[in-house]
Amino acid sequence: MSILKVENLHKNYGNIQALKGVTFTVPQGSVFGILGPNGSGKTTLLGIIMDILKATSGTFQLFDETPGPQHRRQIGTLLETPNFYHYLSGEKNLRIAASIKGKGENDIARVLELVDLTKRKGSKFSSYSLGMKQRLAVASTLLGNPQVLIFDEPTNGLDPVGIADTRELIKKLNREGKTIIMASHLLDEVEKVCTHAAILQRGVLLTHGHVDEILINEDIVELGAENKEQLMALLKNYPQSLSLKSTDQYVEVVFRSGEATLGKINEYCFSNGVVLNHLRLRRKSLETKFFELTSTNN
Amino acid sequence: MINNLKTEWLKIKNYKAFWIFLSLYLISIIAINYIAFEIYHQTVKQEPMAASMISDPYAFPNVWQTVGYMGSWLLYFPGIIIILLTSNEFTFKTHRQNIIDGWSRKDFVHTKLLLVFILSVIVTIISAVTAVIFGLASSEPFSSDGIVNVFYVFLQSLSYISLALLLAVLFRRSGVALIVFFLYGLIFESIIYGLINRYINDQAGYFLPLQGTDVLLPMPFGNKIFYNHAPEPVVLIISSLVYLGLYYFFLMRKFENDDL
């Protein structure tokens, strides 16, 4: 069963096309990252799925069914900003959420404890700090222990400890078998927790799939030597290399995934009279991949 | 629906501003009638001739209409309450959260309409009780003649508060909705009413949104002076119901189709 299936979704705001034919599927049990810079359409996409925005065209399914309120009740969702009644306490706000969901009323104490808000549960929402508001919103998503969670920028407004805690929480929830859909512009965040990702730019889905498939299609080898120019000249003719570029400190050579052998490269350089003082194989970071994808589409 | 109402109750149960405003409003219904009651009795005491010219407006059966008419001036207050409650949702974006958490868009509007209905019932009950109290305190024995005015109070409350809800959903911001509500209700409708009756048809003005129910509850003894060409009550009732239907249609259309 797929949790979410989006097909050819379009959304226009007047002349602006916020989503241009987005299609993807979120498999059950995955941590699915929706990546993109600010204004790429992430929140619009999730807003449509949650029925607070209307799609211009296209369809989507939740749990392989035509979506309805009963499906939303099975999903814990934090969209954009924490939306609560300012004049009510954190606890009373959760009571309202539980009442709408029709479950989780006995779960309020647990979720408040989970996000470390037990001591402030009686304080008005308006007196909460930005981080506390965000944590209350996370607590609300966990009410009734839903099997699917949607987080839009879940670490917004959190301090470094809060960010790490949220990351751990997401991993823990995933280990329990829950499916998590997470939109973020923080690539590092997605890279650390996601199993799957979709990359959006200006409403266009650039790529999607398993994180390993998206990321590991190239090996990058970093090399350093006293004479960088000589090293560059030497590596131009290195067999199987796909591309070559000089950075501030090093020379970077790109190979197809699994084709870079550090020993051979070292031997090649040494035998041609260049002594390396730096040699490292790295997996392409999501950030690099992201900038690559988005720049080719500019 | 009962569960949705329970959720709405959780929203307002601890909203102090709501309870203070509602209490002041309900007390005002009694207070404004007490003032008029006192003025009448003082006038009669000082000028006994007045009693022979005007029968006691607070004696049965007049009291049903008198209390309804006096209360109609205060109907802007429950309108304000519903505008504040609804625009709060837009300001805090909790209308979105309610949908995200699992209400349908229809649930949201229906629950607010249910609140409008309940407020109207409360207004009607308070008006009826006020009428009974002042009626019993006056010269004539209890009479249910003219009790139809209690129904008119209900219909008028429903009309005013529903219009307020529609304006809150259309404009989203309390300031704009309140200004439009007051300007239309207090000034523009009277101007349009006057112009229509003068230049188009001397009955057409009675079919304006609030005018119909206002005419159902005219100033005591003023029916024929102010509304001499007014259509039959049943026609005005139908007109009001048509407007309520239109409010519902536009509320649903706006809230069901728009981005929230």
Image (cartoon, rainbow, N blue to C red):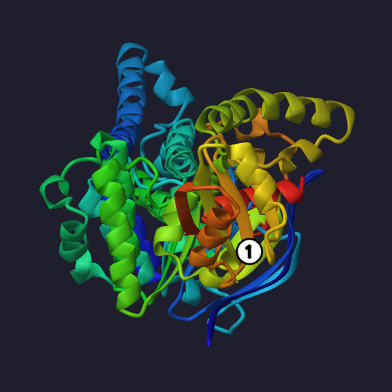
Q: Nearer the viewer, residue A230 or A65?
A: A230
In the image shown, does B51 or A211 lie closer to the viewer? A211
Q: Is residue B173 left or right of residue A234?
A: left
Whether residue B250 is visible here, answered yes or no, is: no
Q: Would residue B53 appear left or right of B23 to someone viewing this image?
A: right
List the single residue furthest toward the left: A119
Tell me the quarter of the picture where residue A200 sits: bottom right
**Relative to A221, residue B196 above or below:** above
Task: Name the residue at the top extreme.
Answer: B46
Circle 1 marks a residue in which chain? A
* Residue B226 percent across, percent down from the top left: 66, 29
Front residue (pair B140, A132): A132
Q: Specify the quadrant that holds the C terminus of chain A.
A: top right
Q: How many marks?
A: 1
Q: Percent position (x, y) of residue B196?
A: 82, 31
Q: Amino acid at mark 1?
A: Phe
Residue B67 shows in this picture: yes
**B247 or B256, which lies in front?**
B256
Residue at image position (32%, 38%) is A130
Q: Residue at x 56, y 39 (%)?
A: B172
Mark 1 residue crowding within 10 angstroms, few (<14) / some (14–19) / many (20+): many
Task: Give the x, y percent position of residue B219.
Answer: 53, 31
Instruction: Farthest residue to the bottom: give it.
Output: A1
A71 up-or-down from B32: above or below: below
The residue lying at 70 percent from left, 53 percent from top is A203
In the picture provided, is B94 more to the left or to the right than A118? right
Q: Residue at x 53, y 88 (%)?
A: A1
SS for dot 1: strand
Determine whether A282 is above or below B185 in the image: below
* Residue B141 percent location from the top left of the image: 30, 47
Residue on which disc 1 sits: A255
